[in-house]
Amino acid sequence: MQFDAELLLLAMAPVFLACIGWEAWHLRRTRPGARLYSWRDTLCNAALALMQQAADKLAWLAIIPVYAFFYDRYRVHTWQAGWASFALLFVAQDLLYYVFHRCSHRVRWLWAAHVVHHSSERMNFSTAFRQSLMYPVAGMWLFWIPLAVLGFPPKQIVTIVLINLGFQFFVHTQAIGKFGGKLGWLEYVFNTPSIHRVHHARNDRYIDRNYAGVLVIWDRLFGSYVDEDPLESPVYGIVEPLDTYNPLKATFHEWASMARDFASVRGSHNKLRALFAPPAWAADYHARRVAASRDVHAPNQINDNNEMAAFSARRRP
Ligand SMILES: [Zn+2]
Ligand SMILES: [Zn+2]
C-alpha cells in the first residue's frame, strides 16, 4: 500500500477532533466557569490548521527535491531500513526541532511565522492547530537538511517531521496535570502537557523556556528547562497581544510589523536588528516609540542608537 506521508496529519484529524471534543466536555464538567474553550478561538485555530496544511502540501513539492539533492550528492552513509536507523532519525530530527524551535523564539524572522502558534490566550488541544502557512518562507525546512546529509531519504524526513508534530498535539491541554508517582519519569524524558504549558506562558519566569518537541532531554541538557510552578499559573499569549480571531491577521501581523520596523529604523545595523534580533527587541522598540510619541517634551523621532543600547541592557521585555 502506498502511504502518502504528507497527509499524515490530515489522516489523524479524527483522533485530534475526538480529543478536542473530550477535553471541552471534560473541562466544562471539572472547571465550570473557566471557559477554556471559545468557539471563535477554536474556529480561528481550525482555519489556521487548514491554511497551513494546504501551503505545506505545496511547499513539500519544492522542498523534497532539495533534500533529494543533498541526499544524492552529500550523504555520508546509506542506512538499512530498520529500527536502529528509525531510532537515529527520530532522535536526530527531535534535536534539530529543538534547535529550530529555540531559534524561532530568538530570531524575529523565524518568530514572525512561529508567533501564530503562541498568539492565542487560551491553551487547549485546538491550540496545537495554530500553525503558520509562512513556515516554508521563514525557512523551517532548512533545519532538516542535515538529516539528508546523515543519509535519510526525503520521504523519511517528511514522515519523521510530521510524526514529531503529530505527537506535539497531545501536549496542548490543561486537562492533564503534571505526571507524578510511577509516571513521574515521563517529565524527565518526554515533553508533557505540564512542560508545554510553561512554553506557552508569557510570565517572566516561564517565557522562552521548554522548547522540546518530543524529548525534553534537550531542554535539560542545554539549560532551557523550567518546571511548572503550582504557585504561579501560566498566563498564555504573547507580550504584545493580538486582538483578533482573524486567521489572516494572525498569520501576517508580525510580518507586517517587521516590515514597518525595518522601514522606520535608521542604519543598516538597526535594519538587520529589525529582521533578526530577538522578538524582545521589537516589543521594546514599540514601547519606546509609544512613550516618545506621548511625551510632548521628547522629540518625535526616537534615537535609534539609544534604543539599541537600552535594549541590549535588558534580557527580556
Ligand atoms: Zn514556541
Ligand atoms: Zn505549542
Image: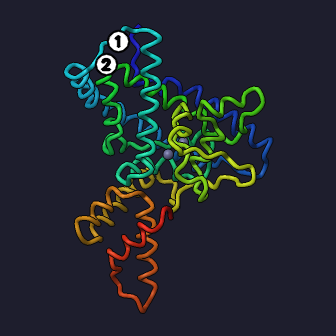
Residue extending farthest bottom:
297
Q: In this orientation, does residue 19 appear?
A: yes
* Closer to the camera in the image, 21 or 304: 304
Question: Residue at the location (36% across, 45% down)?
Answer: 134
Q: Which residue is mark 1?
A: 79
Q: Closer to the N terminus: mark 2 or mark 1?
A: 1
* Closer to the camera in the image, 305 or 243: 305
Tell me the element at label 1: loop
Q: Which residue is mark 2?
A: 151
Q: Are marks 2 and 1 in contact (CB under 8 Å)?
A: yes
Asked which quadrant contains residue 313, the reply is bottom left
Question: Residue at the location (61% across, 36% down)?
Answer: 171
Percent from the top left, x then y, of residue 147? Answer: 34, 26
Residue 276 to residue 196: above or below: below
Percent from the top left, x then y, of residue 289? Answer: 41, 76
Question: Residue at the location (32% across, 29% down)?
Answer: 146
Q: Amino acid at mark 1?
A: Trp
